[in-house]
Image (cartoon, helix red, strand yellow):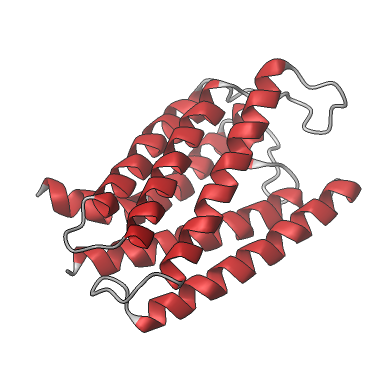
Amino acid sequence: MLESIAMLSGLIATIWITIGVYIAARFYPHYDHANQFCSELGAAGSPTEKISPAINNYPLGFIFCLFGWAIVQLDDSNIAITISGILIIIHGIGTWAAGYFPMDKDPYTKSPTLNCKIHSWAGLIMLLALLIAPIFIAFSPESIYIPFWFRATSIAIVFLSTYYLLKMYQGLKKQKLTGYYQRISYWIKLIWLSIFSLILVQM
């Protein structure tokens, strides 16, 4: 039972964060999903500074780590799959750190606080961990856990996610649609996580 839940936790994380961000935003007057980062929900001084990490970062960190652990524990696996599991665990730990150390209310500040700097580094680690994990899966040795179509999907996920990540950085200069592109880039990787989860739960 616990093993099945662990295998399914990749999908659970995707559903959880989708609902969690929506709920937190309901308590943030005039929050704009298209032009504000997800992290602004938990920013210092925001109306949802306490509630956002409580319903998003902290439980999600555990769920990501649980899924990563499930991958690491797979029987007859290989080093590439194991590394991808470790990267997902790192993503979970980064999720905790990003929730504990809030970003500044102004995401474009020229003089960020220490908490904001730690938050930014945690966010970068999260980003890279979940971007690199599909690469290891795409080029992993032959395995019963990784069908060929999922290898191809993993490559497509990396390219698509990177494309929208670059669009987000372009939006930073105009301070426009940053939230929109951030969500697309991140949710593309979450879709990959969900597919991986569904593959494993059927094994």
Looking at the image, is 50 positioned above or below residue 80? Answer: above
Residue drawn at (63%, 28%), measured in percent from left and top? 119
Residue toward you, 108 or 87 = 87
Residue toward you, 187 or 120 = 120
Placement of the C terminus among the 4 image quadrants: bottom left
The image quarter containing residue 103 is: top right
* Residue 201 left/right relative to 61: left
Residue drawn at (26%, 55%), measured in percent from left and top? 8
Looking at the image, is 88 positioned above or below residue 193? Answer: above
Residue drawn at (57%, 40%), measured in percent from left and top? 125
**Residue 163 location (% of width, % of height):** 70, 66
Whether residue 48 can be seen here: yes
* Residue 15 left/right relative to 188: left
**Residue 170 location (% of width, % of height):** 84, 55
The image quarter containing residue 200 is: bottom left
**Residue 122 location (% of width, % of height):** 58, 33
Whether residue 45 can be seen here: no
